[in-house]
Amino acid sequence: MTIRFEHVSLQHAEASAPVIRDLDLQIGEGEFILVIGRTGSGKSTLLQAINGLFPHFTGGTLRGRVIVDGRDTIECPPRELADVVGLVGQDPLAGFVTDTVEEELAYAMQQIGIAPQAMRTRVEETLDLLGIADLRDRALRTLSGGQQQRVAIGSVLTAGPRILVLDEPTSALDPTSAEEVLAALLRLVHDLGVTVIVAEHRMERVIGYADRMLSLPGDGTVIDGSPTTVARAASLVPPLVGLGRAVGWDPLPLTVRAARVLAGDLRARLAEHDPASFARLRGAADTSSCRREVLSGRGITVTYGAVVAVRGVDLALRAGEIAALMGRNGSGKSSLLWALTGVGARRAGAVTIDGERIGSGTGLTGRGRAARGLVGLVPQTAGDLLYRESVQAECTAADVESGALAGTCSALLARLTPDIPDEQHPRDLSEGQRLSLVLAVQLTARPRVILLDEPTRGLDYPAKAALGHTLRLLAADGHAIAVSTHDVEFAAAVSDRTLVMAVGEIVADGPTAQVLATSPAFAPQVSKVLAPQRWLTVDQVSVALEAAGVPS
């Protein structure tokens, strides 16, 4: 069950150059391949070429041949490859065709004529494999983003493909759920010989599992090699590899376990330094209690029928503060953020912003520019906020509706993700590019409270760094910011306070170093390597070594 790319070039309609150029590549049975590259570098296009989505459905031009299990994808459209290739896209909800979890898992099998009893068995096995048995009767639209992601993976697995292609499969998952999904994929590779190809921006989660790595620098080429070889020269690397580079480890470690073996000398060099004294090097704001409280939430309760999503939460956000909101999928993070805007359902509780009470169910609806200046929310499905015909039209409208200077939104977008064409339709952008556009639109109004729900989903490391820099500038200007995220590395680098939710309640609230560094689930890679010392990021360690006069 091999995949062959023979002198393949992939070029989008209206693009001036191929996104992939003259690629020769062979992928064998049972390989685990990690595909990396900047947002817009062609990762999704490469994946879509494997099952024929490119160019049959996306449009564009394919030169050369892509051969999958002996079938030419130009001659065989995706429906004729469905028995061998399963593809999970970036947006799970957009791919669902039924209403409930169990129906969605069964749908693909119905289309290829699997017997009812075999269908039932596969559904049960998949529910157990992905840990979603308790969701079987739930409506798909009521699930959290991470739960939807696991259902999307399950709906592909039930058809029994020999090749599984996944685009950002862990982007909406909490760390524990991501490990469970990756463990399930490894079982498919090792026990069943399934070929797994994963494009993932959160390399720290996947690189230790991969047999090979494909790096797309963005110039049309594809660099193929072992993870260690590719990571040594790649511009995009996870924190663990960045730490190894900074301190000169050779070979570069790809797992926390391998790094800890090498880290004894580094821990000794850092032992005399207090990580807290280097916290402000991350751009962290002063979180002292004297800072002005901008948002106050008291007794916030959110229910969906008999399900209690948020249980009497008290929450305060202060000016100049970036707070990370973390927790397992389904713990109530998104529901809490929506309740804080006043637009989301709220069964009980009160929210005020600078003393102005925000109503429940109606909230800021219809209050125009004044609403934008109070609170802005970027939801998980950011594309829902985009409805104009071009990127430029969205930016122009954001400037007008926010009363900002012309070009403000475009400038913000260029800082987050450069080189997005003004004339491009938002639906033709990658997930990360769409998110950047929505972020720019919302930030144009410079609201006093900024709420972001999984804002790094689909963003590469430089784009996340740019987002973090933007948020720190906004915090320095006195905005109160809360970021719901499963991205522990982003939280470690950007936030100064972290709150952890479980079963609708806040179970931890404190300085980021205190909450994250001591958490088995949410600790960033640097913390795991250097524990029990409470270091969070590679930059923090590097600057500490330089300050001590020790070359890093």
Image (spheres, grey):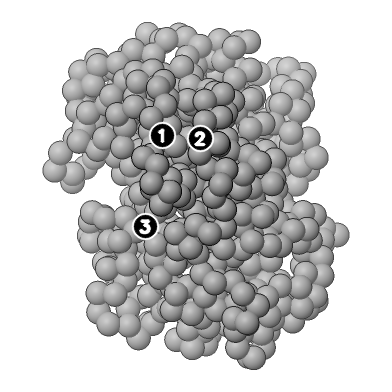
> Which mark identifies residue 266?
2
Q: Is residue 337 visible?
A: yes
Around disc 2, counting alpha carbons within 10 Å, would you say few (fewer than 14), some (14 to 19), or many (20 or more)?
some
Residue holding disc 3: 466
Q: How far apart are marks 2 and 3 (CA)?
A: 29 Å
In the rendered picture of this protein, how many numbered marks are placed on residues?
3
Quadrant of the snapshot with the N terminus: top left
N-term-proximal mark, 2 vs 3: 2
Q: What residue type is labelled 1?
A: Val
Residue at 38 percent across and 30 percent down: it is 248
Q: In which quarter of the image is residue 238?
A: top left
Of the two numbered discs 1 and 3 in the rendering, the one whose residue sits closer to the viewer: 1
Around disc 1, counting alpha carbons within 10 Å, would you say few (fewer than 14), some (14 to 19), or many (20 or more)?
some
Q: Please tell me which residue lies in front, 269 or 463.
A: 269
Quadrant of the snapshot with the C terminus: top left
Around disc 3, counting alpha carbons within 10 Å, would you say few (fewer than 14), some (14 to 19), or many (20 or more)?
some
